[in-house]
Image: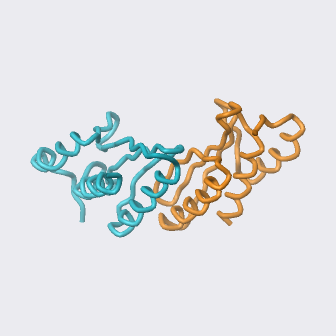
Chain colours: A orange, B cyan
Amino acid sequence: MSERLSDTARKTTLEPLLETGWVLDETRDAIKKEFKFKDFADAMGFMTRAAIWAEKWNHHPEWFNVYNRVDVTLTTHDVNGLSALDVKLARKMDTLAG
Amino acid sequence: MSERLSDTARKTTLEPLLETGWVLDETRDAIKKEFKFKDFADAMGFMTRAAIWAEKWNHHPEWFNVYNRVDVTLTTHDVNGLSALDVKLARKMDTLAG
């Protein structure tokens, strides 16, 4: 279903994300962002809400949490790189993190 | 409130944990374990339940999730090493993952 983002899609959908704090992973075709929250409960609240969308779209993040911090990495294993699903989930996470 | 585990406590409370899959971190005084679940929803269910106990005890894990895997590291920053809180949370997580 997924395919790797085309050069055009990278310009139109990926670049705007890079202005909201997402950065390209230097080691593989992935994007990552560090989210900071008020405290642990807020961070877990974010993860729980994001998890519901991830499951709904069957597209799951790699993420690390310690206290109020959540480090997210998004990539699409099926296509060995970034797909439209990563952009969709990244935007949703930005919205959820408010 | 917390203090680092004494040598005696390490024998009596830490060693049993090391038989359930927890391992000592080689780089610092911490324990870690990789939990595997059926799928992402199960892994998130575990994290959500564990988070409630972590918050209740004001003692938070460092953890990484990708799909059905949750890698947990426990240590007590206040004492720069393992305390009884880590043992308590590790046991709770084993029960929850049960």
Counting from the top left corner in percent of width and height, residue B5 is at 19, 51
Left or right position of A3 against B53: right
B65 left or right, relative to A28: left
Count the numbered circles shown.
0
Q: Quadrant of the C terminus of chain A?
A: bottom right
Q: Position of residue B29 (x, y in %)?
A: 29, 43
Residue drawn where x is 24% and y is 61% of the image: B2
Say which residue appears at 52% left-offset and 54% top-offset: B41
The one of B36 and A31 positioned closer to us in this rendering: B36
Q: Quadrant of the N terminus of chain A?
A: top right
Q: Residue furthest left?
A: B8
Quick one: A58 or A44, which is closer to the camera? A58
Residue ranking furthest to the bottom:
B56
Image quarter of residue B19 = top left
Answer above or below: position of B76 versus B68: below
Q: Is residue A74 above or below residue A51?
A: above
Please provide percent x and percent y for residue A67.
46, 58
* Residue A35 in the figure: left or right of residue B34: right
Q: Quadrant of residue A47?
A: bottom right
Of residues A23 and B77, the one nearer the viewer is A23
The residue shown at (50%, 47%) is B39
Is residue A45 placed above or below A29 in the rendered structure?
Answer: below
In which image quadrant can residue A62 be found? top right
Q: Position of residue A80 (x, y in %)?
A: 68, 30
